[in-house]
Amino acid sequence: FVTRQPPSWIFLCSILGNCLVTSKAAHQLGAVGDKVKFGQLVVGVLNQFPDVAFRILFLATTAFLVFPLENNSTSDLTSTQCCIALAFIAWELIANICLLRMKGPMSLPASGMLSCVMLVGYPPECLETLRGVRLLHRLVRVATATAVGAAI
């Protein structure tokens, strides 16, 4: 059950740690094949952090808002609000796949995997065809956030 109590410090530290680790992984994915020095890694992680932190906090907030309260035992994962949130995540996955396949020839499994990565990060720029996709990807994110906010 979800309560409306303030989060604990342990929870907040775990969210911060998750954002840092995901930022590092997103930077490393974008720099595949390059030798990255420690200073470049730090700059890359700090560059990724705002996008990743915003996305993780958006997903966590959406999950918090659509889960039932402990005094409403009849609600569960089949509730209308939860289905709406899951539908928007599925829509974003499909939009990412379309965006990736629009930019260049890419198989469906490869574009599906990169689409899952793009749920929290942005398109890896180590691939030549994805270098100009970041702005379109941000527009998809803004559209998703706006639609989820309007639906909830």
Image (tube, rainbow, N blue to C red):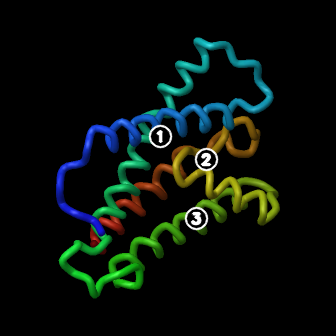
Could you tell me the amino acid type at mark 3?
Answer: Leu
- As helix, strand or loop, the secondary structure at mark 1 comes to helix
* Mark 3 closeness class: few <14, some 14–19, many ≥20 residues within 10 Å: many
> Is 38 rendered above or below residue 3?
above
State the image coordinates of residue 72 (x, y, percent, origin top left). 21, 81
User: If the image is split into quadrants, where does the C terminus sit?
Assistant: bottom left
Q: Are marks 1 and 3 in contact (CB under 8 Å)?
A: no
Residue indicated by mark 1: 18
Please give the residue where the numbered disc 2 appears in the rendered image: 133
**Neighbour tally class for label 2: few under 14, some 14-19, many 20 plus, Cα within 10 Å:** some
Is 102 placed left or right of 72 in the picture? right
Q: Is residue 31 above or below residue 147?
A: above
Q: Nearer the viewer, mark 1 or mark 3?
A: 1
Residue type (three-letter) at the residue carrying disc 1: Asn
Alpha-carbon distance for marks 3 and 2? Answer: 15 Å
Q: Secondary structure at mark 3?
A: helix
**Residue plotted at (73% across, 35% down):** 126
> What is the C-alpha distance between the residues marked 1 and 3?
21 Å
**Residue to which mark 3 is pinned:** 93
Q: Quadrant of residue 110?
A: bottom right
Q: How many marks?
A: 3
Farthest residue toward the bottom?
Answer: 74
Mark 3 or mark 2, whichever is nearer to me? 3
The residue depicted at 32 percent of the width and 71 percent of the height is: 67
Determine which quarter of the picture holds residue 151: bottom left
Seen from the viewer's position, the closer of residues 135 and 2 is 2
From the image, state whether disc 1 or disc 2 is nearer to you.
1
